[in-house]
Image (cartoon, grey):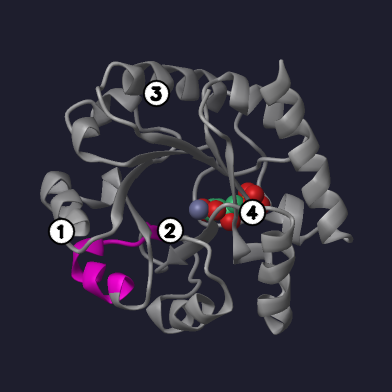
């Protein structure tokens, strides 16, 4: 069994104490730091971009996992590489020339990921799968932290996991949106191996305690 990874999403973090909060999740064993980049076009919200990520790069040595919720992501790939992003994920819905975009990400030396919105079928990724390092199944409509997990995503994760198993290369199956300690076992049982978790960690009154509730569930799942 692949080791399950946790990628805390800093979207819900307290940016006045960002370095401290990143250090806290790092001490709790976080594997990657998930960065939600939003442009107000592809999604109805605006977050941050390379200028801010350049500072985040100085706060941690963990791999930076950037999730681009932006139109025309191909215009900014080199910018994200320059500020130290390790894994760069674009949305299938934002890329008419997805194959080219994925090739460009890999050529820049980053791992390449592709994401799909809740209404996009997994089959739309069949042809690109052999080219990617990561698939991100959105379990909420992207744009905001703190939304409720869409239950039908579990079935979709299962389908995606099957599709990935038919490809002869390691591909991470990442799930993002509405994940809390309660839903973790179901998400893992469906085949996910990277959990993006935002508000369940950063909006909790006790960050460390909240993180531990999640890792307990992950460990328990890995033991059975
Ligand atoms: C949603 C983002 C998520 C979000 C997750 O558009 O892609 O990464 O920050 O936050 P929660 O865990 O609160 O749904
Ligand atoms: Zn995300």
**Circles 4 and 2: CB distance less than 8 Å?**
no
Distance between the Cα atoms at labels 1 and 4?
27 Å
- Say what secondary structure mark 1 lies in: helix
> Where's the C terminus, which quadrant?
top right
Magenta residues, start to end: 65-81
Sequence-first disc among 1 and 2: 2
Q: Badge 4, how many Cα within 10 Å: few under 14, some, many 20+?
A: some
Q: For marks 1 and 2, give the CA distance.
A: 27 Å
Side (left or right) of 209 relative to 43: right
The mark found on residue 16 in the picture is: none
| Residue where numbered disc 3 is placed | 160
How many labels, in total? 4
In the image, 98 versus 121, the foreground residue is 98
Asked if residue 79 lies in the magenta stretch, the reply is: yes
Viewer-side label of 4, 2: 4
| Label 1 CA crowd tier, 10 Å (few <14, some 14–19, many 20+) | few
């Amino acid at each position: 069994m692949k080791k399950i990874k946790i990628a805390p999403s800093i979207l819900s973090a307290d940016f006045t104490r960002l370095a401290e909060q990143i250090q806290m999740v790092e001490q709790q064993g976080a594997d990657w730091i998930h960065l939600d980049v939003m442009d107000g076009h592809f999604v109805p919200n605006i977050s941050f971009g390379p200028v801010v990520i350049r500072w985040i790069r100085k706060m941690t040595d963990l791999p930076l996992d950037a999730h681009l919720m932006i139109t025309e992501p191909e215009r900014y790939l080199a910018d994200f590489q320059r500020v130290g992003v390790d894994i760069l994920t674009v949305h299938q819905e934002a890329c008419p020339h997805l194959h080219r975009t994925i090739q460009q990400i890999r050529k820049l030396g980053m791992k390449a990921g592709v994401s799909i919105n809740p209404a996009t079928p997994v089959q739309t990724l069949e042809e690109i799968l052999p080219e990617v390092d990561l698939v991100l199944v959105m379990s909420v409509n992207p744009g905001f932290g703190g939304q409720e997990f869409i239950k039908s995503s579990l079935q979709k994760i299962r389908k995606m996991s099957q599709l990935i198993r038919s490809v002869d290369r390691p591909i991470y199956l990442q799930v993002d949106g509405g994940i809390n300690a309660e839903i973790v076992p179901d998400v893992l049982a469906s085949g996910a191996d990277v959990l993006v978790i935002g508000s369940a960690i950063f909006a909790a009154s006790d960050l460390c305690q909240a993180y531990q509730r999640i890792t307990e569930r992950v460990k328990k799942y890995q033991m059975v």
